[in-house]
Amino acid sequence: MTATLKAIHALGFHWQTQDPFLFCAHHQDAYPEGKPDLSPVSGLSGRQIGQDFSGKDGWSMYHGSKVPGFPAHPHKGFETVTIVEKGLVDHSDSLGAAGRFGNGDVQWMTAGRGVMHSEMFPLLDEKKKNELHLFQIWLNLPQAKKQVPAHFKMMWKEEIPVAVVRDELGKQTQFKLIAGKLAEQRALAAAPDSYAADPENEVAIWLINAEAGATFTLPAVGEGTDRSLFFYAGERIEIAGMPISEKHSVDFGEQASVTVKNGAQPGYFLYLQGKPIREKVVQHGPFVMNSNQEIQDAVHEFQRTQFGGWPWSSHEHTHPRERGRFAIHADGREEIKD
């Protein structure tokens, strides 16, 4: 038995997801060379600074005024999983934690009761383009977990499991396991209060790269578990006899396995899976709660406390140019990668 296709969606900047996920933002920017202050060497003329999502010349400043990125902003009631396949991100937050990660790393942040953080994209290379390719997935928290302490966890590229599967013709597909398991391989542990920390919730987050002409299988899931495959680059695929072109996502029905046949070009996919939380979702920007009253309470709390205040000199804080990949956690623990 093969799973049926429940829905097909065109992919834009924000990708439509299924419960327990809220959405996925996909960033792919070809930033120019950087100046010593980590800003674009080409300047910012013609951009709406503070709100630049234009994609002009192949890149956006987003909310940054000098360095591209997202200056300090609050989150509450959900989780972000930030997968940086290319480029580097400078993280700073209201807990005093900080880091620089990317080029294959993943940051898993449980906002819980509330945190402010900034995500800036420093243009560190002064001699060639600074390419950025990242996914940020918003994963909901059930009501029972919405007030847990904020926490972030680093998943360094050197430690993330990658499963390699070959089809009957020897064609290869790679599965980068950020959450969940595939056959005998299991992803690193999620953040401790994450919805993904309980294996009963069957949360899986995979990046999949398939060779041209490769066939791969998404395994069967438990009853009630939803899953989606986002085909963001390639030529075309075929599922259950239906051709699907790139830049589309597929939601699957039923629990059976899914066979995906890739086309004549390498295919690149994001796969999301999980049991729905099935609670009312009320969202107001970066606050995700279960009722309008809880949203009002969250906004008032942020206005009163700033979720601990901002300990950095700038809301667009970046780390020194010479620093490599690192993380400093709220408890002072430091990880240095390069």
Image (tube, rainbow, N blue to C red):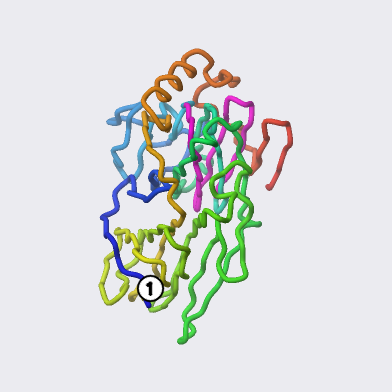
Q: Residue at x 42, y 72 (%)?
A: 257
Q: In the picture shown, does residue 188 fall above or below 235?
A: above
Write down the region rendered in magenta.
74-102
In the shown orientation, is residue 20 left or right of residue 311? left
Is 98 magenta? The answer is yes
Where is the N terminus found, in terms of image quarters? bottom left
Which amino acid is tagged 1? Val
Q: Residues within 10 Å of mark 1 (few under 14, many from 20)?
A: some
Instruction: Single out the residue that lies furthest toward the right.
Output: 333
Q: Nearer the viewer, residue 283 or 125?
A: 283
Residue 28 visible in the picture: no
The image shows a total of numbered marks equal to 1
Q: As rendered, which of 307 and 106 lies closer to the eye?
A: 307
| SS category of the residue bearing label 1 | strand
| Residue 246 at x, y percent in the picture | 30, 63
Extreme residue toward the top, this view? 304
Q: Is residue 165 above or below residue 245?
A: below
Residue 188 appears in which quarter of the rendering?
bottom right
At 37% from the left edge and 51% from the top edge, which residue is drawn? 18
Vertical placement of residue 185 versus 283, above or below: below
- Is residue 180 visible in this depiction of the protein? yes
Give the main secondary structure, helix, strand or loop, of the magenta stretch.
strand
**Residue 179: percent from left, percent from top:** 55, 55
Q: Is residue 166 a member of the stretch shown in magenta?
A: no
Q: Percent position (x, y) of residue 137? A: 45, 46
User: Which residue has dot 1 on it?
Assistant: 260
| Residue 27: x %, y % from top left | 39, 46
